[in-house]
Amino acid sequence: MKENSKNITRRSFIGTTGTIAAGLTILPNSVISGLGHRAPSDKLNIAVVGIGGMGNSNLRAVKGTENIVALCDVDWGYSKEVFAANPEAKPYWDWRKMYDEMGKSIDAVIVATADHSHAVVAANGMKMGKHVYVQKPLTHSVYESRLLTKLAAKYKVATQMGNQGSSDEGVNQTIEWLQNGEIGDVRKVEAFTDRPIWPQGLNVPKGEWVPETLNWDLFIGPAKMRPYNSLYTPWNWRGWWDFGTGALGDMACHILHPVFKGLKLQYPIKAQGSSTLLLTDCAPNAQMVTLVYPERVTSKKDKMKLPQVEVIWYDGGLQPPKPTGWPAGKNMNDGGGAVIFHGTKDKLICGCYGKDPWLLSDRKPVVPKTERRIENAMRGGHEMDWVRACKESPETRVKSKSDFSEAGPFNEMVVMGVLAVRLQGLNKELEWNGEKMEFTNIGPEDKVRLTISDNFTIIDGDPKFNRPNLTLNAQEFASEMIKHTYRQGFSLPDMPA
């Protein structure tokens, strides 16, 4: 009999189920019910992992048209209302146990956990042949992004990143204007967000008792263990490096998507970052990142050349300078941020999610509609575009608007910004080999100094700063950020060739 999700506690869960096995039995494809082609009227059996926040929004977008068969969350206090609203779905604490028990009956998985556990849930799901929808940012590291990209191609599953603006009209229009040559060639782009709206720049807090409704071990997942504190979860994990990717990871997947797609970017070749005080564990209050992309190949039919381009990102209240001719009194922030494309003929500006694009010249271009349109993109259409793709045969499937073939390389752009900020202490522009996923100008003797904490006092009227530091081998530190070492009990499938 299914336990009541509103009453169960971590203690009763552990008492009734015993210790979770460290390993996960992955069923071979031959014994998993493959989807192939399904009629649009057929319902998918969907599991949702991480239901307290955006996962609930994603769930509501597909509920009714599809079957919600399993729900999983590590915090049953934060998620109790979602469990209660979906009594037909089997509740779980541990996604590994859910896969083990329900692997044969699940068609697709929505992943909306903290950033650091996106990849491990999604990758193991894809290895079982499950379609996956993963909240943004797609992953916590470059290696994880590359892995999800290749696993999606290997297992031919339908995928989607949860940057819903990629399905909206503003992104479509921005891409069409760019690729029709309306502003000429673009050599510089500036973008910003007004985030963070959660605390950052914090010292590591002391440990607290774990609430009975939270399984802290499962929240930590593949990251290294640390004592629980209410500053970390259920929402403020975004500002802590082990769990989140700061304001850049939270919002760049929304704001930079028209940049990545419209300018046909792939891997950057150079990166550098700067910020307010950078702490070892917590993201800074504000940061700036510059990524350089090489010239891309164009064809004779292209109306826009693709020269080397510099993409500059600001957050924490910072904004780029307003260009000459900016309308007096017009707020640059449009819905949480904005992008300025500096073209050789004009400047194109769009807001967060690519919304409301306009030209500084005030021209109103009319261009061919080359992008596929999604109905109600910001109100469930993005999720339903993924559902549609899940039901199509891999051989004839129309890819979703943020399929991993694009979202994976794009997310590498986002987490590269995190690397640039965390390696700023090297005091040089970093050179990046995208194919090999490595920095080419960080040597074995390079060191990077990190600030452990920021302790400020006033003694006899004078400010005193106590900022203990940690010096690390930069090459080893960078390698660990590019490809994380997972905690025992959590592992990724091998990287496909």
Image (cartoon, grey):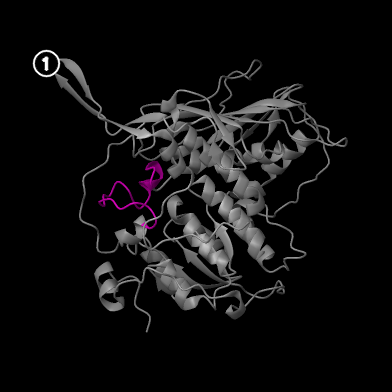
Position above or below: 312 against 402: above
* Amino acid type, label 1: Asp
**Residue 454 spot, x, y in % from top left:** 26, 30
Question: Is 401 left or right of 286, judged from the image as shown?
Answer: right
Q: Which residue is rendered at x = 37% and y = 43% of the image? A: 240
Is 232 contained in the magenta span?
yes
Question: Crowding near pointer 1: few (<14 within 10 Å), some, many (20+)?
Answer: few
Q: Quadrant of residue 108?
A: bottom right
The residue that mark 1 highlights is 460
Pick the quarter of the image with the N terminus: bottom left
The kind of secondary structure element at disc 1 is: loop
**Residue 174 spot, x, y in % from top left:** 71, 37
Magenta stretch: helix, strand or loop mostly? loop
Q: Nearer the viewer, residue 328 or 317?
A: 317
Q: Which residue is rendered at x = 69% and y = 74% of the image? A: 41
Farthest residue toward the front?
444
Farthest residue toward the left?
460
Position above or below: 153 against 31: above
Farthest residue toward the right?
300
Q: Nearer the viewer, residue 172 or 415?
A: 415
**Residue 267 spot, x, y in % from top left:** 63, 39
**Residue 164 spot, x, y in % from top left:** 60, 50
Q: Which residue is rendered at x = 48% and y = 55% of the image? A: 118
Position above or below: 30 against 417: below
Position above or below: 138 against 203: below
Pick the quarter of the image with the C terminus: bottom right
Highlighted range, magenta: 221-242
Residue 162 in sight in this render: no
Question: Is 439 left or right of 184, judged from the image as shown?
Answer: left
Q: Which residue is rendered at x = 15% and y = 15% of the image? A: 461
Residue 127 in sight in this render: yes
Question: Is 373 left or right of 248, judged from the image as shown?
Answer: right
